[in-house]
Image: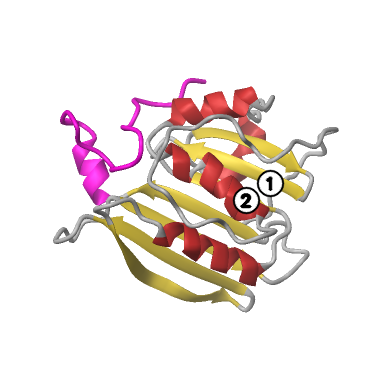
Amino acid sequence: MRPVPWLMLGLLLPVLGAAAPARAPKAAPAAQDPFNELFDTACMQHIGAPARLQSLMEANGLSPLQPAEAAGLLQGQSGVAWLVPLASGRYAVSWADDGTCSVYAEKAEPAVVQKGFARLVQAAPKPLQVRSLPGRGPLSADQVAIQYGWATPGDARLRVRFRLVTRQAAEAGVQAMASVSPGEAMVEQAPTPQPGAGLPGAPQPEPGTTR
């Protein structure tokens, strides 16, 4: 993960709590795990719904970063990003135009984050099933990636793909990054959505992010 150019903002916000579309019940996040609480609130509850995510950010008084400031978070893709300063530390949320939503933490405890991330992903809405994907291993001496997917039983294609990367080094700039992106099944479905189709327990995909 590349270091994020964190900006000092003169405010502390509570964990984002604006109303979000209902979805399947999930296991409660681990105690003292604001990273996964933010990932759940900002990304998991807004799969395929960029306009609702933007409304959530606006309701909490957060403005999008300028393109040059957001570039490091978007990893070369087009999209929008926000800094989210919380009482527990500094975080960022990004939405790329390919439908990927990501959360970054400047400081995080890898073991706590990994456990909380797995707990969130395991609470897949029915009838989707959780699949563990390749990528459980070190990317470097202190960097570990974990990946999961949600899929319909009997379908080899993923509907949703999840990824978590953590780093042990406190001076890394970013110690945790989690993302959720549409899988092959959602991407193939997007051009010709059918009534009632889409991810169970999540809003239908929207045409794009309103800037």
Mark 1: secondary structure: strand
Q: In the depicted view, which residue is nearer to us: 5 or 17?
A: 17
Residue holding disc 1: 91
Answer whether residue 61 is magenta in the image: no
Q: Position of residue 160 (x, y in %)?
A: 33, 51
**Residue 204, above or below 41:** above
Residue 99, percent from left and from top = 40, 39
Magenta stretch holds residue 188: yes
| Contact, mark 1 vs mark 2 (Cβ under 8 Å) | yes
Q: Main secondary structure of the magenta part?
A: loop
| Label 2: element kind | strand
Looking at the image, residue 87 sits to the left or right of residue 201; the answer is right
Q: Looking at the image, which residue sits at the far right?
A: 10
The type of residue carrying mark 2 is Tyr
Give whichever of 82, 18 is nearer the camera. 18
Quadrant position of residue 73: top right
The residue that appears at 79% across and 45% down in the rendered structure is 87
Residue 154 is labelled as none
> In which quadrant is the N terminus drawn?
bottom right
**Splitting the image into 4 quarters, where does residue 71 fall?**
top right
Q: Residue at x 61, y 45 (%)?
A: 72
Up the image or down, 89 lies above or below 176; here it is above
Q: Nearer the viewer, residue 87 or 145?
A: 87
In the rendered image, residue 199, in percent from the top left (x then y), is placed at 28, 42
Where 22 sits versus 117, above or below?
Answer: above
Per the rendering, the mark at residue 104 is 2
Q: Is residue 32 left or right of residue 177?
A: right
